[in-house]
Image (cartoon, coloured by chain):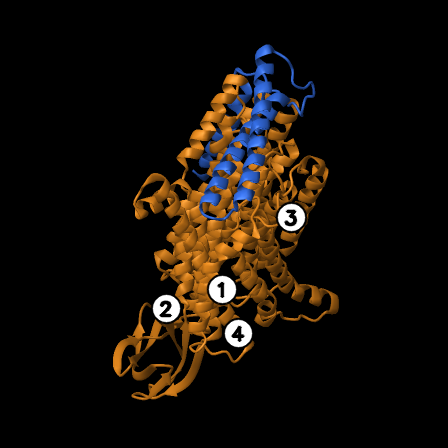
Chain colours: A orange, B blue
Amino acid sequence: MNDIGEFALLLALATAIYGLVSYVMAVKGNRVDLYFSADKTPVIVFGCVFVSSAVLLRAFMINDFSLQYVWAYSNIELETFYKISSFWGGQKGSLLFWTLLLTAYTTIAYYQNKKKRLEVFPYAMCVCLSITIFFLLLLNFSTNPFERLPLPPEDGRGLNPLLQNYWMVIHPPTLYLGYVGFTIPFAFAMAALITKNLDDSWIRLTRKWTLVSWFFLCMGNLFGAQWAYVELGWGGYWAWDPVENAAFMPLLVATAYLHSVMIQERKDMMKVWNMSLILLTFVMTIFGTFITRSGLIQSVHTFDEATLGYYFLGFLFFVILCSAVMIIKRLSLLKSKNELDSFLSRESSFLFNNLLLLGIAFATFWGTIFPIISEAVRGVKITVGPPFYNQVNVPIGLALLALIGIGPLIAWRKASWGNLKKNFKLPVIAGLIGGAILFPIVPLNSKAELFTYATFILCIFVMVCILSEFYKGAMARMQLNKEPFVKALGILIWKNKRRYGGYLVHIGVVCIFAGIAGSQAYSVHTEKLLKIGETLEIRDYTLRHKDLKAIQQTDIKTRIIALLEVEKDGKVIYVSKPEKEIYKGQNQPVSEVALHSTWKEDLYVILADYREDMSITIKVYVNPMVSWLWKGGLIIAIGTLIAMWPDRLERRRRLERMKKQELAFSPAQE
Amino acid sequence: MVHFFQLLFVVVILGLVGIPLFSPKTIKNLFVSRDPALEEYKHLLVRKEEVLLSIKELEFDFKTGKLSDSDYASMKEKLQMEAVSILEKIDILENNKKTGKKASSEKIGAV
């Protein structure tokens, strides 16, 4: 069966190459026969990669340790749930998984557009197939997941215990869905450049793709933070690790694109900028995978056998070169005839937002590559840690937060100072009152605490700005249509899904800002050796060591569980059970954090060490407002869903447009 | 058995990509030659929608107090002028099409 999986990969490569060549020959020579032949290849390539993936998954399920990859990332005792995640747990499988998603996305894009007979379509398919060929070349000739072991062992080495966590099952696929998703907008953007179809039709074709990919990338980042928080056991969720940065950067650039593209749609301007942003987003996704697979950067998130650096570096330079050349060649066609109506307008606020987002992305990029550059130039590896990122990104982030509030209150095209003053009065007063209430409550002894205080004031300001938008909109509808407030609000959101879905996303972002500020500045922790019956105190909590148990969970896994009664205000509120898990064949035991989470704060308990006399060393963190991050993520998900929901009005407008075209010019091309 | 499946795989793929090469063709050209007038028409229809939406948005912004009376009046006038200009261009293209006149002789990248 493994032979079939391996053979399917080879066939996928051959078909993809055939597809690319025949598409190019067909459109260059107007060869209808060749075109329809090439048109079958995206689906065939997906079919082959699907068969290959199914064979690899089967090998995991039946414990086929004749495959080196299955042996390295699984064992007999591993739960089925984690056997599935082993598929993408290592470099080889993750590349196959990436290729599976890429070919699946290409197939969906193919079915969405094949009947439209657009000129850009075969070129977009060519770009997708070219990228697929790169991954298939790696899978076939450099990092083959079907590599055999000469003497198959009886059991496998097992999956890294740190990866045996439910967040790790959903985090990589979510992130990959985001990373890979940006290939489609990139492909259509490149196709638009090649065919000189540089109006905004490529933007309309890929709008949903961009939003869906952005959503998955955003959720992937948050799921990764969740995993780091509950599994790595250092009390935090984000460490400005190079791999975390690599997933964060495309999100920033894509966010900038999602905002600036609205200006192109409305005013038919900023074509070069938008084109550059979408190409840069794709470049950043490839840079992200270069970081994880290059072996140049040490991180808990990189793959063990990271050996593909030069291939990805070469591919990265090729993509950058092609994108830059195409944009330069089409510069005259991309130039806009329109200009901003006023400096004081929503459009300007979007431009500032773009600059700030790119500023954070650039600072993060610089911090990520600086160790590589310093090692290459001076032979010394300098680690760039959180202080650098915090120093640069926190002030920019605060300016960005302020803009989230300012933007919606400024009119499109042109605003006046008088109206701005009127509109900002309530949010500014609310922010100041909030600041005055918080002043005696929050400590203000350090720069970090001052920044946090400023963040809270800004969060209140922004929330009032956004909520007043909902209120004013509903009131306007109420007066106009004599509807009750709730109905007016519901219809307002439903009829303007993109706008109000976006505002909901902004509310989620505000929650995340508040969560980060609170948890970074006011977190406290302590560590203590406790004998049975002894207590540890932290903030309002008292933890009493009650018991230490050892449970043989499976043949290879032993759990050491400490039982600690947690008291607050003299009452036992719950029993905390931090664990150490010991896996046969693994040198280091893995900590399982005991977490008690409320909207106000998290009590985070780690069993750092234990002794035969039942004494334990525990580390306890009280992290305020961490749950705000996850709730913010949920609000972002709801907001994105609303913004993405199919708009009947938009569909009707599109159909009317097509009908008009058909009437005036037959046959229609759209 | 494995070789049989591999062979089957190859035959299926060759069949799928090969059949279109030998089937009778119902169309002669891959893409309809790009008519610059149609391209312009499509662009104008989209622009018309965007300008009308912008007018709607402007009215909403005015109702929610984001615009002064004078800004609202001047912006609305500007957008209405833009809309009128677009509608005029659309009319011209439609009339040209009806009367068979060519809007432009330039051919853009016909495939």
Type of the residue with mark 1: Leu
Which residue position holds label 3? A315
Towards the viewer: A344 or A582: A344
Q: Amino acid at mark 4?
A: Leu
What residue would you read off at disc 2? A556
Q: Amino acid at mark 2?
A: Ile
Extreme-left residue of the structure: A571
Instruction: Answer with mark 1 or mark 2, whichever residue precedes in sequence.
Output: 1
The chain that hosts pointer 2 is: A
Where residue A417 appears, as percent x and y from the top left, is: 56, 53
Tell which tag, 3 or 4, sits nearer the viewer. 4
Q: Separation of disc 1 and disc 2 at Cα?
A: 51 Å
Question: A505 or A59, which lies in front?
Answer: A505
Q: From the top left corner, tell me how far across and down residue A132 is, in percent.
A: 56, 42
Disc 3 to disc 4, how far (Cα)?
44 Å
Disc with the residue nearer the chain's start (4 vs 2)? 4
* Point 44% across, 66% down: residue: A515
Marked residue nearer the N-terminal end (1 or 3): 3
The image's mark for residue A458 is 1
Q: Are marks 1 and 3 on the same chain?
A: yes
Few, some or many residues within 10 Å of mark 1 (<14, 14–19, 20+):
many
Residue A450 tag number: 4
In the image, residue A562 lies at what x, y percent?
32, 79
